[in-house]
Amino acid sequence: MVGTLDLACEVTDIIGGVDTHADTHTVAALDGLGRLLGHATFPATPAGFGELLRWLRSHGNVVTVGVEGTGSYGAGLFQHLRAGGLRIVEVDQVDRGARRKTGKSDPTDAIAAARAVQAGTATGTPKTRDGVVESIRALRVARNGAIKSHTAAINALRQTVITAPAHLRSRLAGLGAKGLVDTCARLRPGDIHDPEQAVKATLRRLARRCQMLTEELAETDKDLQTLISQKAPVLLAVHGVGTDIAGQLLITAGDNPERLKSEASFAALCGVSPLLASSGKTNRHRLNRGGNRGANSALHRVVIVRMKTHPETRAYVERRTKEGMSKREIIRCLKRYVVRELLPLIKAPDQERPDLKLHSIAA
């Protein structure tokens, strides 16, 4: 009887692992006993995705596929495999310690991905990226790029003013950012063979670049406000949460926030779960420096706003300070409480807001 079960496991249960790259994907297949059945490489194209899936299924019944980079190079393959009805598991890159022992190659990484799924060390559910949250993420990419470019243009404008001819520099001195941009955008340079006229031309171009980026930011912010207000109106109603923070937290959770099994898992994902730092007679926790740093930054901003303007939070800070906690430790605790409050709203943003307004802090 045991032999029959083992044979059935060998024939029917196939675990796949995929190492993804920009141009090619390498896949490996293991049987139910963990034996390698083979590996192959396919182009990262829709036709290649189909060939990869057919190759996997040629070995038997595919149970699960572990894929590296479902949010980057593996995004297209993930959507194709998901449409094929397969269970997909997000696999992290191979641990460096293990890589030093086994070396690095695409087949090796694909086999490691399959073994991580089979051993149960890889259990993450990928983001589906097929809803409004994905639209928000795409718009935020443009917004973040525009902010960086606008900052660079303003800095270049100010530096150019510093090295401009004295009378031009004195004319522009003391102006704020908007005034400087508006004034420089109206400059009328002459022959650029004259260094002064070339400086004027540079100032005008930098200023008009700033104006163009400002308009782009305004349009993007308007689109984001529309999407986030429709997706999570109750999240925006929470004290300290604005459009930017709500957008970041929604992106962190994804279009399928049900993949977050617990409040503790979301806290770990955001890098706000307490980590033990005890030794000997010392019993304490420390800050978590892992997790999604964008989400961590968003929660940090919520906490800072509440520490200034939220009576319950201010009372909590005062009480914990008297107990001897440092400001960093208090902020860590507050981030964890904010996760407890916001996760139900992120998972069910269109429902009534739960009455979770920092009761744990006041207790």
Image (spheres, rainbow, N blue to C red):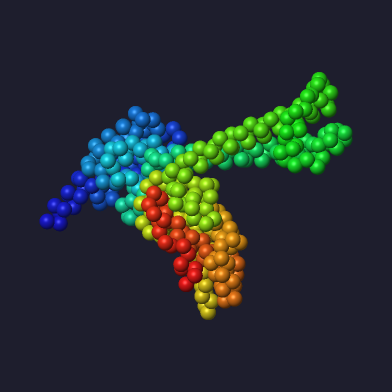
Specify whether residue 239 is in view. yes
Depth check: give the residue in front, 242 or 299. Answer: 242
Is residue 149 depicted above or below 189 in this figure?
A: below
Res 107 quadrant in image? top left
Please report the residue visible at 47 percent of the width from the left and 44 percent of the height from the top: 228
Image quarter hosting the N terminus: bottom left
Q: 239 or 202: which is nearer to us?
A: 239
**Can see residue 111?**
no
Residue 273: x, y in percent?
A: 47, 62
Name, please, the residue furthest toward the left: 1
* Residue occupying image coordinates x 63% and y 36%: 214
Q: In the rendering, at what x and y percent does residue 174 appear? A: 80, 42
Q: Is residue 154 left or right of residue 74?
A: right
Outermost residue toward the top in this view: 191
Residue 197 lies, in percent from the top left, at 81, 25
**Residue displayed at 79% across by 24% down:** 189
**Residue 173 image offset from top left, x and y in percent:** 82, 40
